[in-house]
Amino acid sequence: MKSYVFLATGFEEIEAVTPVDVLRRAGMEVVTVSVSTDCHVCGAHGVTYVADTTMSETDFSDAQWLILPGGLPGATNLYDTPALRELLVNHAAAGGHVAAICASPAVVLAPLGLLNGKAATAYPGFEDALKAHGADARQSQAVVADNIITGNGPASSLPFALAIVAASCGMEKAREVASGMLYNL
């Protein structure tokens, strides 16, 4: 099983790199995916990353997690990718795990109906967008609701990533990874 982190122009760099780093420390296989045809993706703060692959080159049948960083216009660019929207809906409907942070819970997951009836968080100011699509908006660094984890922003990237590790590998592994990073979980 693999976890996929999706990169679109304007993504929040720390919200993409932190989950990749933390999940790999936990021994999880992680693949970065550009939603465009180019593996070079420029983040919200002008840092260009080279994704491992592109959406069109990837078979997601082995996906454990689909992970969306936030940032603007990154979250909007993720939502504007029809193949990603379809993948998210189908994966979640099959009980697959989805995680999104910052603007992405409100801009991507909520409009797709993936947060309807679920507790969720997003970047402050996006609460109304969550509620408009039936989510129970919370003010928290990370919220776990069944097969979906949401985070609220850049400073929460580490707790968000550790929540994914805990959901996949158990709380003991999450604490081990956190301890190695000098973070108290």
Image (tube, rainbow, N blue to C red):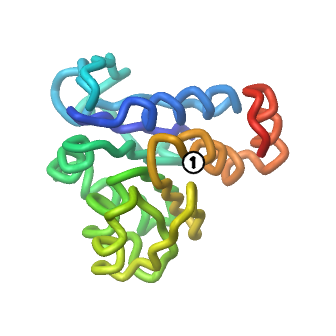
Question: Residue placed farthest to the front in the image?
Answer: 125
Quarter assignment of residue 11: top left
Split into 4 quadrants, where in the image is the N terminus?
A: top right
Quarter assignment of residue 147: bottom right
Q: Is residue 37 left or right of residue 154?
A: left
Residue 75, percent from left and from top: 26, 48
Type of amino acid at the residue the image marks with label 1: Phe
Q: Residues within 10 Å of mark 1 (few under 14, many from 20)?
A: many
Q: Is residue 55 left or right of residue 143?
A: left
Total numbered circles: 1
At 67% from the left and 54% from the top, the residue drawn is 167
At 64% from the left and 50% from the top, the residue drawn is 163
- The residue tagged with tag 1: helix, strand or loop? helix
Nearer to us in this view, 130 or 113: 130
Residue 17 to residue 81: above or below: above
Residue 106 to residue 35: above or below: below
Q: Is residue 185 left or right of residue 141?
A: right
Residue labelled with disc 1: 160
Residue 82, percent from left and from top: 16, 52
At 36% from the left and 70% from the top, the residue drawn is 127
Quarter assignment of residue 117: bottom left
Residue 115, percent from left and from top: 41, 72
Residue 34, percent from left and from top: 27, 30
At 43% from the left and 52% from the top, the residue drawn is 100
